[in-house]
Image (cartoon, coloured by chain):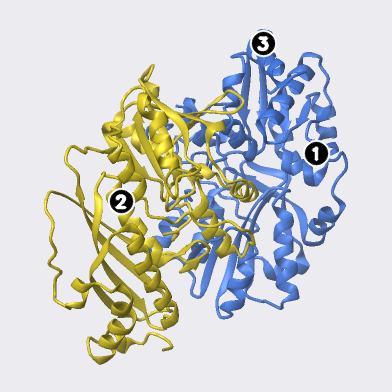
Chain colours: A blue, B yellow
Amino acid sequence: MEIVELVDFLKNYDGRKIRLMEVCGSHTHAIAKHGIRDLLSPQIELLSGPGCPVCVTPTAYIDKLIELSLEPNTTVATFGDLLRVPGSKESLNEAKGRGGSVEMVYSPMDVLSLAQDHPDRKYVFAAVGFETTAPVYTLLLDNAIARGLDNIRILTALKTMPGAISFLCDNGAQIDGFIAPGHVSAVTGADYFNDLAAKYQIPFAVSGFGSKELVIAIYGLVQMVINKDNTVKNYYTSVVDSGQNDIIEKQLAKYFRPADVVWRGMGIIPGSGLLLKEEFARFDAGSDGLDEDNKRNKACRCGEILMGKAKPHDCPLFGKVCTPMTPEGACMVSEEGSCFNAYLVK
Amino acid sequence: MGKIIMEHGSGGRATGELIREIFESQFHSDVLSEMEDAAVVPGDGTIAMTTDSFVVTPLEFPGGDIGRLCICGTVNDLCMRGAVPKYITCGFILEEGADIDTLRRIVKSMAETADEAGVKIVAGDTKVIEGNGGIYINTAGVGFVPKGVDIKAKNAEDDDVIIVSGNVGDHHATVLSQRMGIKNTIVSDNAPLQEMVGKLIESKIPVHVLRDVTRGGLATVLKELALASGLRFDLFEEKLPVDPQVQSFCGLLGLDPLYMGNEGKLVAIVPKDYAVQALEVIRSCKYGENACMVGAVNIPEDETEEGALIMKTEIGGRRFLDILQGEGLPRIC
């Protein structure tokens, strides 16, 4: 079938309501970027799940980064999108304004040259992310060890996907199918989701990020829902294998151990995160136990939105108090956040 | 000559030497050489004035440097109101330790760019501060607006077309590549646009709006213009001119060319009937060969479309674009 035929089907579908969830921030962004929602019948609803790493980071983590940035001779290095995320009282940007040392970098590897050039300063990288980004931090540590740099630390908020998907399914999120995260699958392999599909009797479609790739995967997923084909199908074969990437898995196993971690708005999910192993604890800036999640504005519904139980428009703050310029919750900060993307369409 | 030291800012002998050897010898400006407290220059009519400060890192990059940038930035700001740029002033803030050979190259580049843009550097100032060898430049410019020319942000009208004068994102991608040590052949588009604007006005094309596409990128500029007019701006994804290398660079880093800055591109909004002519004029200019018609201005169909910038995506969807949120990349100009 040609793409236009797939679009035609999706646009004119008038069967029972189908709710699909993407659990990858890059998918959320790509769906908005390509205007994919415009191509779907009102009977096909796309929900944005907990796939944006910034959006699922609890306030205690931001507060800890702020505390570190204000310590003498310490600099917090971070990707740009974390700067504006509200902690319980303020954001890193606000802390920077009152003297916190915060540096925005494009790659964790930038920390190596910073640390080398300023041996008297301690550099803490805000290591946020999923299965996809975690391997990069292991390379940072490999390099730090090889170069004998003892002034590099990471503060981790690393999460793994299966725990979050189980949590959603166990807690009554009404979802008919998952668009499986393309980047995560590139690391873990598509089979990673087999157990979840079988346990919860729900289909998964692994998708790429181009407009056509998304249309193909969504079409495939809708067909699977209709045919009750509760398996995992890989529509991103140019990048994703069925099995895991052994090199990366080995790197992850070398440095990290599974841990119970907090997801913003969702609470502690057992075994859904990664923490540094005991033998690498010297690189940890205090990541364990950052469990408090006190949102700045009590009315913020980011948690429910992440779980697909509410839509951005259901939140009383959305578009009024909470906008991309004045975000109350993390979902409004990141380009990958569901509120941010919904705000653009209003 | 070595490095800048605090003495270069003393106002005494060292300052005099620096001015003579570095600035005066390059700028060849009779007005400047008078060394008066203020430049007195001829001119009458409607005056356009602007000022801009330049803090880019690195100071030199493929396709330009802070010197070329500080002339182009101010020249282009004047041009965007339809003015003919005429006079420029420059203020240097030099940090202790700044490399004097680098400064010499920057000043030479300023002089050459000023010649190219047809502007005269008529006044200048130098200060030296403690620091780490940084160089910062402020320029101010004066131009004259020809009679009958009225170009401003809110002038877009229903049925106008939107033209962009070339590939978007080049400058931003160049500076970022340099900072990250990524090897590629991307070159900054850093250029003065007085030829392009002059020809558009000479051709009697009733230009409604001109804007240079700098920080924030094309999307930010167009969204601001859409808000200023209250109309709906439609953008066509498949028409956007992006260099393939810049496109891949952006893909790799998760950046969007729509939000990346340029330093030698403009957006022109003209009535549909003049679209082809305007495009031809722009393409005939030195820095306009890749100019494209990228969108259209329309009356909003409902209130959600008032001041909206909507991109028709290649697959047929719609993407609402807003101004750049957050920092983007600091210190690109």
Please state, as top left, top right, bottom left or bottom right, where the N terminus of chain B lies in the image: bottom left
Query: Marks 1 and 2, how far apart in space?
Result: 46 Å
**Sooner in the amino-acid sequence: mark 3 or mark 1:** 3
Classed neighbour count for the residue bearing mark 3: other residues with Cα under 10 Å, few (<14), some (14–19), many (≥20): some
**Which quadrant would residue A235 be assigned to in this image?**
top right
Which residue corresponds to the image point at 55% horizontal and 76% vertical from the top-left?
A121
Name the quadrant containing residue B158: top left
Of labels 3 and 1, the one closer to you: 1
Which amino acid, mark 3?
Tyr
Q: Name the disc covering residue A238, or none.
A: 1
Residue B77 spot, x, y in % from top left:
30, 51
Of A318 and B197, nearer the camera is: B197
The numbered disc on residue A210 is: none
Residue B77 has which mark?
A: 2
Q: Is residue B204 above or below residue B19?
A: above
Q: Are marks 3 and 2 in contact (CB under 8 Å)?
A: no
Q: Chain of mark 1?
A: A
Label 3 to label 2, Cα distance in Å? 51 Å
Given this view, does label 1 or label 2 mark the residue nearer the observer?
A: 2
Chain letter of the residue beneath label 2 in the structure image: B
Left or right: B4 in relation to A157? left
**Residue A76 seen in render:** yes
Residue B287 percent across, percent down from the top left: 44, 49
A136 lies left or right of A126: right
User: In what element is the residue under mark 2?
Assistant: helix
Indicate the position of residue A130 as horizontal and vertical percent values.
69, 48
Q: Residue furthest bottom?
A: B13
In the image, which disc is placed on residue A13? Answer: 3
Amino acid carrying label 2: it is: Asp
- Compared to residue B209, the image places residue B38 above or below, namely below
Say yes or no: labels 3 and 1 on the same chain.
Answer: yes
SS at mark 1 in the image:
loop
